[in-house]
Image: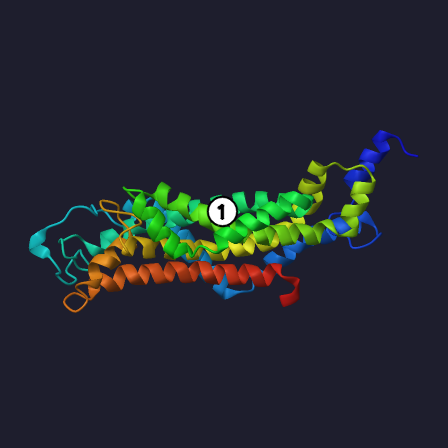
Amino acid sequence: MPDMTDSQSLVDAVPTTAAGPVDPSQQREKARSLWSDAWHDLSRKPLFYISALVIVFLVVIAIWPSLIASGDPLACDLSKSQMGPTSGHPFGFDTQGCDVYTRVVYGARASVSVGMFSTLGVTVLGSLLGGLAGYFGGWWDAILSRISDIFFGIPILLGGVVFLSVIKGGSVTTVSLFMILLGWPQIARIARGAVITAKQQDYVQAARALGAGHTRLMLRHIAPNALAPVIVVATIALGTYISLEATLSYLGVGLKPPAVSWGIDISAASEQINNAPHMLLWPAGALSVTVLAFILLGDAVRDALDPKLR
């Protein structure tokens, strides 16, 4: 029987994506090629580059909106109320006489921030709880499944109207925390299923037989192989959360003035669509392009990471 040093080295050498007792070096090469193959597939998709460029642009202007908009989104002149495009103001003015172009640019910050924070929180919390439930099973899995069933029974839009109506002073933090609260069960179920599938593979059983502990099994052998479906769902969900923030703000329970948000501007413009359609066109167009970019990126990532679609 090998000593503890030899056993530990054998555990480290167990491949992470092997389906049987074959050469470990070849299996590690295949594990590395999973992501390289995915990138190779993505690099051949024009829609991936288009959506990625749009998203990078949105992130940049969300961080530094002054790069392309020098005005103040809260500076208004009632004498210019509902005026159309003029020199220096290509999108015209809203009911309060604020520059629509400036508000559209600055509105990206709130929408992208809510989407990013919500997706990060949902992914971390859902992956942690779902991964532990899938790995340990038993009572932990049963409890998590029942809790997630309860949250799945709450329509997220209706829950947002009720929850955010009670909490006054809507902010990016408040809206993001609400989305995390009701959004984590989706990622948890995806992570749970991926972990259950991964832990049944031969390479995990071999690592366990060689003495690998729970932490090593989860971090070195299971997590890397259960990560792909979580990334796909999180990428698509990001666009959904941005759309949800705009919907809640439109209904008056999400972000509230003086915050600058596409949803707030769409809500204000909907009452004047006949008199000043430009007020609705630009923020609604920016929201649609943003959501579409994240959906297209998620679809491209899904096609690249799902072997069944190759």
The amino acid sitting under disc 1 is: Val
Q: Is residue 94 left or right of residue 309?
A: left
- Check the picture and name the quadrant holding the C terminus: bottom right
Q: Where is 231 relative to 84, above or below?
A: above
Q: Is residue 125 left or right of residue 209?
A: left
User: In the image shown, does 244 or 67 lie closer to the viewer?
Assistant: 244
Q: Is residue 213 left or right of residue 185?
A: right
Q: Where is 19 relative to 308, above or below?
A: above
- The extreme bottom residue here reads 274
Q: Residue at (13%, 60%) from the top-left corner?
A: 82
Q: Residue at (36%, 62%) from the top-left corner?
A: 288
User: In the image shown, does 146 or 212 lie closer to the viewer?
Assistant: 146
Q: Where is 43 relative to 3, above or below?
A: below
Q: Residue at (26%, 52%) from the top-left corner?
A: 252
SS at mark 1? Answer: helix
* x and y, in percent, of residue 138 in the image: 68, 45
- Check the picture and name the quadrant holding the N terminus: top right
Q: Is residue 78 visible?
A: yes
- The extreme top residue here reads 4
Q: How is the image coloured?
A: rainbow
Residue beneath disc 1: 122
How many dots with numbers?
1
In which quarter of the view is residue 275 placed? bottom left
* x and y, in percent, of residue 120 in the image: 48, 45
* x and y, in percent, of residue 183 in the image: 47, 50
* x and y, in percent, of residue 128 in the image: 58, 43
Q: Is residue 109 visible?
A: no
**Other residues around mark 1 within 10 Å, as few (<14) / some (14–19) / many (≥20):** many
Q: Is residue 145 left or right of residue 60?
A: right
